[in-house]
Image: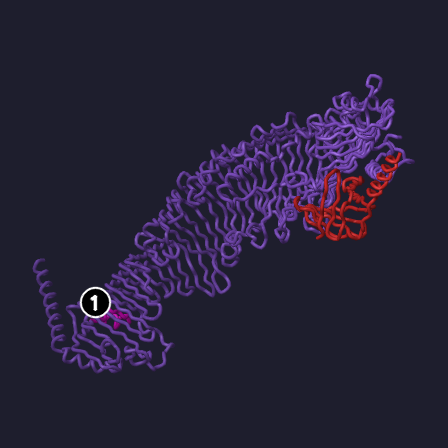
Chain colours: A red, B purple
Amino acid sequence: MKKIISLLFLSFILFAGCGKKEFDETLLYGKWKCGTLYEKYVSSGTGYTWDTADDVDESEAQSFTWELDGEKLTQYHQMEASSAVVPKQYTVTTLTETTLSYTSNGKTYTFTKQ
Amino acid sequence: MKKALKIIGISLGSVLGLSVAAVCIVIWFVFTPAKLTPIVKSYIPAFVTCQTELDTVDLTFFSTFPHFGLRLHNVALINPMEGAPSDTVAYVEELVATVDVDEYLSNANVVINGCYLSNVKANIYVNADSVANYDVFVSDTTAEDTSSTSAFNKLAIKDVKVENLSATYIDVPGNMNASVSNINLNANVEMEGDDIDADLKMTSDAIAFALTDSTQLNVSVGALDTKFEGEIDDYNFVKGTLNLFLDNVSADMAGSKYADSLKIQTHVPLEVTLDTLKVALKDALVGINEHQISLSGDAEIDDDIRMDMHFSTNNIALSSLLPLVPKDIIKDYLDGIDINGVIQLSGAAQGIMNDSLMPLITADATYSNGSIVVDGLGHDLYDVSTTVHANVDLNEEKNSYATITSLSAKTGKSSVSASGKISDLLNDIAVDIKANARVWLLDLKNDIPSEVFATGWADAVVFAKCKLDDLTDVNLNKIKANGDVVLTDFEAIYEDSTFVNTDKIAINFTLPSTHTAQNFKEVIDVGVSSELLKLSMTDFMNTTVENPVIRVGLPDVMDTTKDLSVACDFKMKNLAVDLVADTINAQIRNPHGSVSMVPKGKKTGYTCLMNCDSVYANVASDVAARTGTIFVDAKAEYDSTYEDVLQQWNPDVKLNFNQGQIALSAIDFPIKIAKIKCDMNKNRFKIDQSKVIVGNSDFQLTGIINNIVDYLNGEDILKGDLQFTSDYTDVMELMEMVSGMGDTTEVATDEAQATTVAASADSSAAVEEDNPFMVPLGVDIVMNTDIKKALAGKKIIEHVGGSLTIRDGVLVLEEMGFTCDAAQMQLTAMYRSARKNHLFAGFDFHLIDISIADLIDMIPDIDTIVPMLKSFSGKAEFHLAAETYLKSNYDPKFSTLRGAAAIKGRDLVLMDNETYQKISKLLLFNKKKTKNVVDSIDVEMGVFRNQVDLYPFVVSMDKYQAVLSGYHNLDMSCRYHISLTKSPLPIKLGLNLFGTLDDLKYKVGRCEYKKTFKPQKQGKVDETVMHLKQTISSSIRAGVKNQDALIKE
């Protein structure tokens, strides 16, 4: 019985440690770079993304809206040829003044502030 | 008897002897020179004032028998004057005069029986002060007694002889020199009462005359022989004959020779009435060398001159006449012209001549056996002849005219003839002429540009009526002319490369034109007709025209202030064109219509109205086209100030044609154009009617495109509204037809390979650029479709309606709805070309109530995006949207790829495939007892860049319920999870699938989504996921036009 109680306590401690993370949304504002991929977050909840490897510059960037809820960063991409909206959700692991890291489908993307 | 005769003879001899003795006594002893000379000398001062010389004076009898005469020796008048060639004014070596004294004493008749002068010399000189050296005679100051009657009844001067008279004459103020030598004169004059008989004959050797002033005239006569025989009655009527012969006559003036060694002779029988000054000539002849002019008629000088004088020449050979014409005149008028032939002139001058009247002059001229060679003309004219009648009325000059009775000439094989009338000869000459010509065109080779070789016959008949000034000025507005030219066996070659030939072609012209052009004054009318006309250009074109009838109207082409206008009507039975180089041949049956070109200020207007019965055309073995009737009504206004072609030409074209058919080798079926009726101008292109059949498809395209010029000027966008209507459209057939058109892939590959090779040798070699389709900017064109039935793949779709829009750089296929036995469908697609390497393509596709198998069959690529879809069968509602930017070679830029899909189905059958069997086994499905019918699925997916997110969805099958979710990448690597949320089993299992879709790994795990579809039990994560799933579902369905068609829950 003592073991069971110890196990439940350990589990509580572990689950408490894996609880929802909170990030400062204002740290997200600005232009971020990951290799040739750029993302730009604006305080109004809009954002832009482009990849210079595909011969796209900032003026041709695709827009999106975004929201940061805890560690979940969700981008909503409104399509032009359709009324459809394509959501894309990431799990933020790091957000500092200089670094943004998030994961999606098992891949991690790390951006540096520009 | 003999004695009596002897006595008489002795008596007469005695008397004669005594008379002779008496005469001798008188001559030698009474009137000796010593006695007579002083007497005569004493009288000389009474007659002359200058110094005189006289050797002796004696009385003659035997030399002047039977009359006495006075003979003076060496008589000289001497009057020295500075500058004069001699002091002697006149010198007579011997002067003998005899007078019939008895006649005067008996009958009061003055009879000078003889007057003989020999070796006479005279030197006449007028100095610069106009003082003459012959002004030495005492002037008669006594008043003339006109009341007295004649002192004698008869005056007869017989046998006047002058031998060897030579004289010089120098007139300094008159700049005149003259000399004559060896004049010999014989004259007999007998005057009785008012009647005079005269017989004069004079000869001389050399006569010279010169004017030393600016005229520089020199005239010389080698010999002169003059003879006059005649009589004067009543001091009034002169009748006689004057013969004059001048030999070796030469004249020059200012260095120009006007006569050279001419023989001039006249034979002038004349009758002159002195009181009325009436002269009558009959067959008077004036000859110059062998040329003669005959004069007959009379002239009378009163206050007026009345004349009726006729003249005619003999036949004069120009070869002998022209040498008599001064060389300067020849040079001025006949330089480079060699003319021969015979001329004959005749005519008359009749009427009154005074200050206000002139006689009427008529003349007839004949020129025959002529030949004319003009340097550089290239045509030697022969058999030239003409007959001309002229009427010159100097009183009414307008009445003066010339009639060309005939004119003919030949050159080479060619001949020309003409006749007509020339009016108002003295002022504004007008011609009214008819000419016929038969011309061998090779004879005109020097008149035709060297690049052109023409052969054949031209038979022409030309009428012309106009003023000469208008003709020389080519004043086409004032010239009336018409003519017909028939070319036979005609062949023309231009620069050895262009050939025209016909057996016969007729050309006619009328001036001024009788036709009225709409936009200009038509002056020239030219018509061309032929049975068969062939035109070919080496290695380029062969053209055959059957029965062409062409009429061309032209304005005054000489008016250089205006640009050329042309109006042309044409009609042909058949026009066949074979473009050899391009292996194109065409036949146009019965083309007819009109074309025109009219300048309008700085612009030029064009019109073309054409009908034809049919057109056949072939391009090698690639294209074969034919049409039925074609009607074209085209207008254009060319303005070179614009740069683009459409604005330069400002066209207004109406086109109708029927029964067209085009067969392309690349297509198995012909394109049939049953009808097209359209019109176009610079602002719009309008298709009123069209009916096209392409293979199995038929369609009608109508509508209008506006703002063409404003669009070209950048002032407005190009707007269009088109309607595509079809009863049946075979989509795949049409796509196959256009597939590969303009595709340069193979070429590009070859070029790329070549570029690669070249690049290895030269790194600076240029790289081929892609040339993607760029949507025009500034364009707003909508094409509405109305297709009753279409075959898409193997599916018949019906009621296809929607619009294709090109709007300012964006091409949109908007809400294209249609139905088929598989589904109701709606497609919206967009293509935008911001720049060549940044193209946007997107679509929004909704299929309502479609068989999944049909869907995969229709869109095979769907298997890549939703690979598990092929595991189901049955009908579903399918929504798919995707968009991406493309590279110039149309490869997607995956960083820009976005997509969403929503699938909703019910009563689907889960296919019993290998994957299903594996999953069933791992999740402990009792397949034998489980009916593999899925009640419903509701799938949402998102595509972002190269990842496809499959949001959780429920699959309910018999007693089982599972939730599927996961993701896969476009490289087909994946990770999926299946949560078995309902089953007969007491535990809730989960199954993870990972690896690649071709090589899936399976691993049983925990059930991750046991609360996801239980709202009351959902956690935050589940709630968020469902929110995203709903976002896709609602947003993508919002694009469905017919929401009622959606499958209801």
The chain to which mark 1 is attached is B
User: Could you tell me how many numbered marks the image carries?
Assistant: 1
Q: Position of residue B37 (x, y in %)?
A: 17, 79
Q: Position of residue B115 (x, y in %)?
A: 23, 69
Residue B211: image location, x then y, percent: 32, 69
Determine the secondary structure under disc 1.
Answer: strand
The quarter holding residue A76 reads top right
Q: Residue furthest front?
A: A2
B1002 in the magenta segment: no
Local packing at callout 1 (Cα closer than 10 Å; few below 14, some 14-19, many 20+) is some
Which quadrant of the figure contains the N terminus of chain A?
top right
Q: Residue at x 36, y 78 (%)?
A: B145
User: In the image, is residue B102 part of the stretch drawn in magenta?
Assistant: yes
**Residue B1028 located left or right of residue B392:** right
Q: Amino acid at mark 1?
A: Asn
Q: Find the residue positioned furthest to the top.
A: B928
Q: Residue tagged by mark 1?
A: B164
Q: Is residue B401 left or right of residue B654?
A: left
Decide which of B533, B289 is in the foreground and name it.
B533
Residue B679 placement (x, y as % from top left): 70, 40
Residue appearing at x 67%, y 46% in the figure: A35
Q: Is residue B848 visible?
A: no
Q: Is residue B531 left or right of residue B172?
A: right
Magenta part of the chain: B96-115
